[in-house]
Image (cartoon, grey):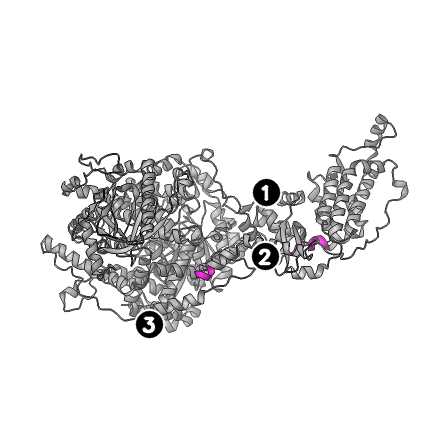
């Protein structure tokens, strides 16, 4: 009925390198095979270095101090405050690198990009470091040249609208690009660029909003200037003005490309040409659960937009969503992705949208759309915690009236506000989101609550909360201060107020803070998701058998643990050729259900059945521990297939419940029958001679670690008796002819695969032996034990420096090494002792119970039968003997009881958590006046639409300036002087 | 301003929180839409987490204000459902009569509600899309042109189905008797409905209204009544279009908007 996923256990905190890559929006893993094949020796080292960045054009921008990173195939820079200035450019767009001849002691490079921008970086680290950096850069550039990426740039930039924008307005820019290059093999073509740029549905179906009101023309003008001076698409340099321009809203025509550039999805598109179309082609006509789900939602995605009332829009949406579900089948499709995809397709082409969706699901909104939606739940928890800190009064009121924040805020995050606000406003939030990162969602969310603070304190229930939010979103276009006497204040819309509050009041919310908050709550969320799915798995069982819910829970835990260790193979979708394209019939198939393979089953059983594990009690004078290994035996495989009632070669949770139910509640007679049936492969009610032997081996396997010879004796008596009785009870008709043929001397031989021993006889033989009788009466059932497992350590629970340290120390391999080390010492001082823990442990002393008198009367014994036993069971007795020798040599004097008790203390330390300290620190950091209604400043001016274009531009810039305070470039005046000088510096020969 | 004042019976308006659950594409949203605005059309508001709608009803001398939480049906939203069904006084669990697995899912929802939700919750089981299995019953009253339009607009309709083309009974995968027997056993209200024709829709909400311990809710929420925040601003437009639950026989007349 249900699927069980252990995916959440595999989460790993990103490393420092990965965090840097995430910061620079650089693809973290090589997405295509070409990169994976790359020789690791060629792998260029990563390196960062202190540097001062300035533009090669005088007076354009200040110089900024920061760090320059080489992460092949990218070069990235971030200013010290990590937000004012940054770039991440592919090395293949760098056309020329020169060392500048400047004042003594200054080490500076001039980089020319494809777009003709000249970047001057002054390496301020020590000389050898700078030299090393340069050589790394040189090597990395060479690799890129060899890969032919340099040549790909030219074709690629043609797909970007910014090229058309810049070139139509100025031919001069083209000429400036003409200077030759040291590295490039080909010169940029002077031929006019055709307009082959990618675009979205908006080009045909119009963009939402009134272009005049949005002041599209002014925005385009400002952007054209900016892009011309600072590079564009692949080589965009992000200066403070870039962020400010984004905050006043991107112009519609440029929006798609800027989203792509700001989010870094452009790098994916650049390095995977043709991937999207190939993916679609390869999966043509394929039908999966995801494609069915997608189909249901196509007409529910921004249905009010004209493009989605046409087949063109719908099929583009379908292709993008399907392609993503093929690319990432584990995630597949989640409702809300349709909203995102529909939104971005208005502004970008399918291919662009596909890669942006990839970046969204993978990096920007991690885990939001996963099957467990853990990312969504986690961020909701984080948001709640932020509300509690920043807006405690609202938080307390919500608690008091039992209103859940998530009922409203969940869709905000899940659909990036697109589903909540009028589109034109939501897209401006999306602009900022791509530019400034996921923190924007939290900042805006907090601002919404804060602005509506007084009304929120009046609400009494979830419904009231939702209605209030709905009304607020509907009024975003209205004036924020309709009664103000100042016309400039009146002109400020509620949406502008919202953005101001978001970025002013809540600028304390940083990406680092979000990351650390996520770390704080992650294990809590994972735990609650897991216990939720455990509860529903148990609830969804068709039958609990004779178990109560707690016992079923223990079985689930054992299953879950086994799945963590040996994950079942992913649900392999049937090959597309087998399914006819009419998906309706396939749609009514049963739901996917998690089933485990034999290997996982072995782990599962080892948790439950004492004989399914090898436990060695090791004491070496320092420690006493239990090493547990998974036993492998044909018997376990047999059990696996015995429980596989539907013959799928895999067991579900239900199968396990029913299987255990079939043995754990049995009495003596039922157990004997169960054991008999287990070995009666063809279910004809008879064991063959082979099966009797197998059964005996099973006995030996189960009893392999028992103390003393009692069980060994019992098994050998069992075999003697079984064959004796079996032969005795053989129908005479079969014996006669054989005797006639072979003469009297030769015993009657039944072919080893013929029916031989029935249940009644088996029962008789078993009951003839005290040891076996007690085994079937209690010990067999009792060998299945449902014990609470120690809480599994979450791999993510550790955080902070100490946590990292601990997790690196306490790895499994280190533990093993420690164990080996102590073992060695123990051996040298003669205290090393290894003892196998018996599975049943009934006998702790060497004492053999007496065999019962045989039930057979002497008259029933055929003289011939003895030889039949000996002939068949020679090999088995050999194994019995060897088993006896090995086990008796090691395990003669064990204090089983105490060993078992000690065994409950495996070396599972709970990880030390430095969370309280972190928590306190961040609390202190967040300490600020919680609820001062801010009066929006007047510098947010966009009143008169009658003004001419030039003034209008200024006003846009006023608005722009309103968003950000002056940026400290982190340089002294003297440094700035140096940076200015560099502009005029000549290259070194 | 508030709906309570508009209807003139402040103390008689009872708020009932109702949640819709069920497998994806069984027509939960369509059922709500039919009930709330007596329409059958594309869902303007895509369901993310849950859509929230309200509808006022009259039952004898009482006015009920249904607060309807229409949850997302996709399996992965399941873990979010408790957020929506907590404190709910009523639930409508919807399945699709043409899809056997949807009844299984409905049963598991019922189980979950009975164990996790409000202990006094009134649960109704609704077998939707019944128009697909008796084609003859779906046409009277509605002109055929509007019907085909409805079909095209139904985003959650099972794709590829052509109602009226040959043996309609074969589409049915859940016999009425089976579902009825299950509902009786589990103590649920049971209806077969069609959001498309309106069949049975109002009946669900009427029967739920009758079964809900209204006095109990009134006593519990009286304190909250009259506060400005408690009543949503949207209700004003809906007071006129309230459903009179006494007129249950003809669904078409149920709503006079």
What residue does disc 2 label? A554
Q: Nearer the viewer, residue A443 or A343?
A: A443
Q: Nearer the viewer, residue A133 or B28?
A: A133
Q: Which residues are magenta?
A: A779-803
Q: List the single residue furthest toward the front.
A: A104
Q: Nearer the viewer, mark 3 or mark 1?
A: 1
The x, y position of residue A272, in whole percent, is 34, 39
A224 over A409 or under it: above or below: above
Q: Please, what secondary structure does the residue beneath circle 3 have?
A: loop
The x, y position of residue A758, in whole percent, is 76, 41
What residue does disc 1 label? A646
What residue does disc 3 label? B226
* Residue A307 located left or right of residue A213: right
For disc 1, the neighbor class at 10 Å (few under 14, some 14 to 19, many from 20) is: few
Q: Nearer the viewer, mark 1 or mark 2?
A: 2
* Residue A907 located left or right of residue A926: right
The x, y position of residue A743, in whole percent, is 87, 27
**Between marks 3 and 1, how big is the CA–CA gap?**
60 Å
Q: Nearer the viewer, residue A118 or A279?
A: A118
Dot 3 and dot 1 within a common chain: no
**Main SS of residues in magenta:** loop
Taking the magenta stretch, the answer to whether it contains residue A792 is yes
For disc 2, the neighbor class at 10 Å (few under 14, some 14 to 19, many from 20) is: some
The x, y position of residue A929, in whole percent, is 30, 72
- The residue that appears at 40% across and 54% down in the rendered structure is A16
Let me know if residue B228 appears in the view: yes
In terms of image quadrants, where is residue A730? top right
A932 over A840 or under it: above or below: below
- The residue that appears at 27% across and 60% down in the rendered structure is A473
**Between marks 1 and 2, how big is the CA–CA gap?**
24 Å
- Mark 1 and 2 residues: CB-CB less than 8 Å, in contact? no
Let me know if residue B197 appears in the view: no
């Amino acid at each position: 009925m249900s699927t069980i996923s252990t995916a959440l256990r595999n989460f790993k905190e990103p490393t420092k390198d990965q965090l840097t890559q995430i910061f620079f929006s650089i693809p973290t893993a090589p997405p295509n095979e070409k990169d994976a094949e790359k020789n690791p020796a060629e792998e260029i080292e990563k390196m960062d270095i202190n540097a001062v960045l300035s533009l090669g054009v005088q007076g354009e921008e200040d110089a900024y101090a920061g760090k320059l990173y080489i992460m092949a195939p990218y070069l990235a820079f971030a200013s010290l405050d990590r937000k004012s200035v940054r770039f991440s450019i592919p090395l293949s767009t760098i056309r020329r690198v020169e060392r500048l001849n400047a004042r003594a002691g200054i080490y500076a490079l001039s980089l020319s990009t494809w777009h003709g921008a000249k970047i001057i970086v002054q390496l301020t680290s020590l000389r050898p470091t700078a030299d090393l950096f340069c050589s790394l850069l040189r090597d990395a550039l060479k690799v890129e040249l060899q890969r032919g990426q340099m040549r790909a740039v030219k074709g690629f930039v043609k797909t970007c609208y910014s090229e058309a924008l810049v070139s139509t307005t100025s031919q001069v820019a083209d000429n400036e690009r003409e200077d030759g290059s040291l590295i490039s093999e080909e010169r940029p073509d002077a031929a006019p660029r055709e307009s082959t740029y990618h675009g979205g549905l908006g080009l045909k179906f119009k963009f939402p909003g009134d272009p005049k009101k949005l002041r599209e023309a002014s925005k385009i003008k400002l952007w054209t200037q900016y892009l011309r001076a600072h590079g564009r698409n692949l080589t965009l340099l992000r200066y403070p003005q870039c962020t400010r321009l984004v905050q006043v809203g991107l112009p519609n025509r440029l929006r798609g490309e800027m989203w792509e550039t700001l989010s870094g999805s452009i790098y994916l598109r650049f390095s995977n040409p043709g991937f999207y179309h190939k993916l679609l082609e390869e999966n043509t006509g394929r039908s999966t659960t995801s494609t069915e789900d997608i189909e249901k939602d196509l007409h529910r995605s921004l249905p009010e937009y004209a493009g989605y009332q046409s087949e063109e829009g719908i099929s583009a949406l379908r292709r993008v969503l399907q392609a993503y579900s093929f690319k990432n089948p584990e995630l597949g499709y989640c409702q809300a992705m349709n909203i995102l995809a529909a939104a971005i397709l208005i502004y970008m082409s399918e291919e662009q949208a596909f890669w942006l969706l990839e970046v969204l699901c993978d990096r920007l909104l991690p885990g939001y759309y996963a099957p467990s939606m853990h990312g969504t739940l986690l961020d909701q928890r984080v948001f709640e915690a932020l509300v509690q800190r920043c807006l405690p009064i609202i938080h307390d009121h919500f608690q008091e009236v039992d209103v859940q924040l998530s009922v409203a805020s969940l869709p905000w995050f899940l659909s990036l506000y697109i589903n909540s606000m009028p589109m034109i406003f939501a897209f401006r939030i999306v602009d900022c989101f791509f530019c400034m990162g996921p923190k924007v969602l939290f900042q805006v969310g907090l601002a919404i609550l804060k602005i509506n603070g007084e009304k929120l304190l009046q609400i009494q229930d979830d419904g009231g909360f939702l209605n209030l939010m709905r009304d607020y979103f509907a009024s975003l276009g209205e004036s924020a201060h309709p009664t103000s006497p100042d016309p400039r204040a009146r002109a400020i819309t509620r949406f502008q107020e919202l953005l101001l509050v978001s970025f002013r009041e809540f600028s304390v919310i940083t990406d680092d803070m979000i990351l650390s908050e996520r770390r704080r709550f992650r294990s809590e969320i994972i735990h609650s998701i897991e216990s939720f799915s455990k509860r529903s798995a148990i609830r969804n069982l068709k039958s609990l058998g004779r178990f109560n819910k707690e016992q079923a829970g223990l079985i689930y835990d054992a299953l879950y643990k086994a799945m963590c260790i040996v994950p079942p193979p992913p649900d392999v979708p049937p090959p597309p050729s087998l399914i006819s394209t009419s998906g309706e019939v396939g749609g009514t198939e049963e739901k996917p259900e998690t089933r485990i393979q034999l290997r996982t089953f072995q782990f599962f059983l080892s948790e439950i059945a004492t004989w399914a594990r090898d436990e060695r009690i090791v004491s070496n004078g320092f420690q006493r521990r239990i090493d547990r290994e998974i036993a492998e035996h044909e018997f376990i495989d047999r059990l696996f297939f015995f429980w596989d009632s539907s013959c799928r070669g895999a067991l579900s949770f239900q199968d396990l419940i029913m299987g255990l139910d079939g043995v754990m509640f049995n009495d003596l007679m039922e157990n004997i029958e169960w054991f008999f049936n287990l070995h009666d492969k063809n279910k004809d009610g008879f064991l063959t001679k082979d099966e009797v032997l197998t059964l005996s081996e099973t006995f030996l396997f189960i009893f392999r670690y028992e103390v003393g010879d009692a069980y060994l004796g019992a098994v050998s008596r069992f075999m003697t008796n079984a064959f004796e009785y079996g032969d005795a009870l053989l129908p005479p008709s079969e014996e006669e002819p054989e005797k006639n043929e072979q003469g009297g001397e030769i015993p009657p031989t039944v072919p080893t695969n013929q029916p031989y021993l029935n249940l009644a006889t088996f029962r008789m033989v078993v009951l003839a032996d005290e040891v076996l009788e007690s085994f079937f009466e209690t010990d067999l059932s009792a060998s299945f034990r449902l014990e609470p497992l120690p809480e599994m350590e979450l791999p993510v629970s550790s955080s902070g420096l100490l946590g990292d340290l601990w997790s690196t120390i306490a790895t499994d391999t280190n533990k093993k090494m420690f164990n080996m080390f102590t073992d060695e010492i123990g051996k040298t001082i003669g205290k090393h002792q290894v003892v196998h823990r018996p599975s049943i442990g009934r006998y702790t002393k060497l004492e053999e119970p007496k065999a019962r008198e045989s039930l057979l009367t002497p008259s029933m014994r055929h003289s011939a039968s003895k030889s039949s036993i000996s002939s068949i069971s020679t090999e088995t007795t050999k194994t019995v003997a060897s088993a006896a020798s090995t086990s008796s040599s090691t395990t003669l004097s064990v204090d089983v009881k105490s060993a078992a008790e000690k065994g409950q203390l495996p070396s599972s330390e709970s990880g030390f958590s430095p969370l309280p300290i972190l928590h306190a620190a961040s609390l202190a950091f967040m300490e600020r006046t919680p609820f001062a209604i801010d009066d929006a400043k007047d510098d947010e001016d966009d009143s008169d639409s009658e003004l001419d274009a030039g003034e209008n531009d200024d006003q846009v810039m006023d608005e722009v300036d309103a968003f950000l305070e002056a940026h400290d470039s982190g340089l002294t005046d003297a440094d700035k002087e140096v940076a200015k000088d560099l502009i005029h510096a000549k290259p070194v020969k | 301003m508030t709906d309570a004042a508009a209807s003139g019976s402040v103390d008689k308006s009872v708020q009932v929180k109702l949640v819709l659950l069920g497998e994806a594409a069984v027509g939960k949203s369509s059922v709500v839409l039919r009930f709330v605005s007596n329409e059958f059309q594309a869902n303007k508001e895509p369901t993310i987490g849950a859509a929230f709608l309200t509808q006022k009803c009259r039952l004898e001398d009482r006015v009920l204000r249904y607060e309807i939480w229409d949850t997302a049906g996709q399996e992965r939203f399941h873990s979010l459902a408790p957020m929506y069904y907590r404190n709910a006084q009523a639930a409508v669990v919807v399945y699709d009569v043409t899809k056997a697995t949807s009844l299984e899912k409905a049963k598991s929802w019922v189980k979950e509600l009975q164990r996790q939700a409000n202990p006094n919750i009134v649960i109704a089981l609704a077998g939707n899309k019944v128009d697909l299995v008796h084609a003859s019953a779906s046409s009277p009253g509605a002109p055929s042109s509007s019907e085909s339009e409805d079909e095209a607009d139904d985003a959650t309709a099972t794709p590829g189905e052509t109602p009226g083309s040959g043996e309609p009974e074969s589409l049915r995968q859940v016999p009425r008797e089976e579902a009825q027997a299950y509902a009786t056993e589990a103590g649920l209200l049971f209806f077969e409905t069609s959001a498309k024709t309106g069949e049975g829709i109002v009946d669900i909400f009427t029967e739920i209204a009758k079964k809900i311990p209204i006095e109990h809710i009134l006593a519990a929420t009286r304190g909250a009544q009259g506060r400005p925040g408690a009543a949503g601003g949207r209700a004003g437009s809906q007071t006129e279009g309230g459903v009179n639950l006494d007129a249950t026989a003809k669904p078409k007349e149920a709503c006079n908007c």
